[in-house]
Image: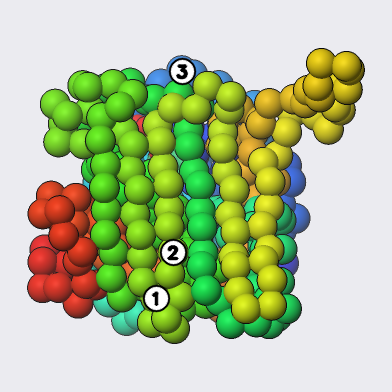
Amino acid sequence: MNGVLRIGLIGMGRIGKLHGSNLQSLVKGAEIVCAADLYLDEDKERWAKSVGIARCSRDPEDIFEDPDIDAVFICSSTDTHADFIVRAAKAGKNIFCEKPIAVNVSDINRSLRAVEKAGVKLQVGFVRRFDKSHKAVHDAAASGKIGKVYVVKVCSRDPEAPPMSYVEKSGGIFMDMMIHDFDMVRYLSGSEVTEVYAAGGCLVDSHFADYGDVDTAIVTLRFENGALGVIDNCRQAPYGYDQRVEVHGEKGCVRDENQLEDEARLATASGTLGAKPTWFFLERYNDAFVEEERAFVKACLSDAPVPVGGKDGLKAVLIAKAARKSLETGRPVRLDDPDVTSD
Ligand SMILES: NC(=O)c1ccc[n+]([C@@H]2O[C@H](COP(=O)([O-])OP(=O)(O)OC[C@H]3O[C@@H](n4cnc5c(N)ncnc54)[C@H](O)[C@@H]3O)[C@@H](O)[C@H]2O)c1
């Protein structure tokens, strides 16, 4: 590889463009040599040119078949991920895949088998592990500074609800939104989830119900090490992207606060006033995306393990499935429930 990882980018939508721009300008040792999108248009070609990608295609096969490409970034829609992972693995490419790997267990398992058989790397896009505040909370808890972990809390609220055209294909709040938080509670607790209990409702927009979905959900969790957890998600928070995590233990508590648009605080006789949290994930996790990309490129170039792998991708999906069943049945659901572990 001569110190340079030659990458094929698949999918030039929201997240593909973000990774593509970062890889081309902020990640040392990365070079995108081809970008493919089934719905390639002038706008995508213009964008590719603007970030210095020389070759565009409508067909990801052009990437898989190119022996000069070392790795792929799979940033296309979720329903394409499993097939592209299998194809990339067969072609001997290292793989970065956006979350989730797939929404059913058989597709994830066949992806992971292909990756293992080919001996390539697979990193899954759980970007929040690379946020420096969340990582500092994790590091403090993992170092033993707060002793035995009792409670893990994650609050994740979007500033505004997505359009119904997105909701229809999203896979539902647990698979689309809370999936990041399921990974985060595993990361923060240092333990595996054994049981979940979910409650949810359509409080923001009753149309979520048309797609069998909810817009607000609370999930409580039990972990193997005895700790308890709670995740709170809402599709609407007019003050901005609300992203806070906390770990409480026998010797203390560690938590972070929202990243604000600026740090200034106005204090007058009527009270104090500060800026709102940054608007959404592109702003809040901008630096974390770069760290995530650097970690993948470094792991490929130095042949080291990736920091977030296929098993992490699978575990988060299993928790999402258990949460869905709990919401539907109104009962706690164990992670070894056959409805969770199979399709
Ligand atoms: N990590 C995160 O925080 C985060 C944030 C947003 C999206 N995502 C994930 O990234 C993926 C893409 O989401 P998005 O918001 O960028 O969607 P998007 O719709 O903006 O982009 C998807 C792109 O994939 C292309 N595409 C679809 N099928 C294809 C195929 N067969 N071959 C090649 N290209 C194809 C589409 O034309 C589109 O340009 C989803 O899996 C989503 O869950 C992750």
Q: Quadrant of ligand 1?
A: top left
* Residue density around tag 3, few if under 14, some if 14–19, many if 20 or more, within 10 Å: few
Label 1 to label 2, Cα distance in Å? Answer: 8 Å
User: Can see residue 255?
Assistant: yes
In which quadrant of the rendered image does the C terminus lie?
Answer: bottom left
Provide the secondary structure element on which disc 3 rests.
Answer: helix
Residue at 77%, 26% in the rendered image: 274
| Residue 43 higher or lower than 145, as above or below | above
Would you name the residue on which mark 1 appears? 223
Q: Residue at x 62, y 43 (%)?
A: 285
Please give left or right for residue 331 compared with residue 82 in the image. Answer: left
To which quarter of the image does residue 302 belong?
Answer: bottom right
- Local packing at callout 1 (Cα closer than 10 Å; few below 14, some 14-19, many 20+) is many
Evaluate if marks 3 and 2 touch, with contact meaning CB atoms under 8 Å apart.
no
Q: Which residue is mark 3?
A: 42
Q: Are marks 3 and 1 in contact (CB under 8 Å)?
A: no
Q: CA distance from mark 3 to mark 2?
A: 47 Å
Q: Which residue is mark 2?
A: 229
N-terminal of the two: label 3 or label 2? 3
* Image location (x, y in percent) of residue 261: 74, 28
Q: Residue 206 has which mark? A: none
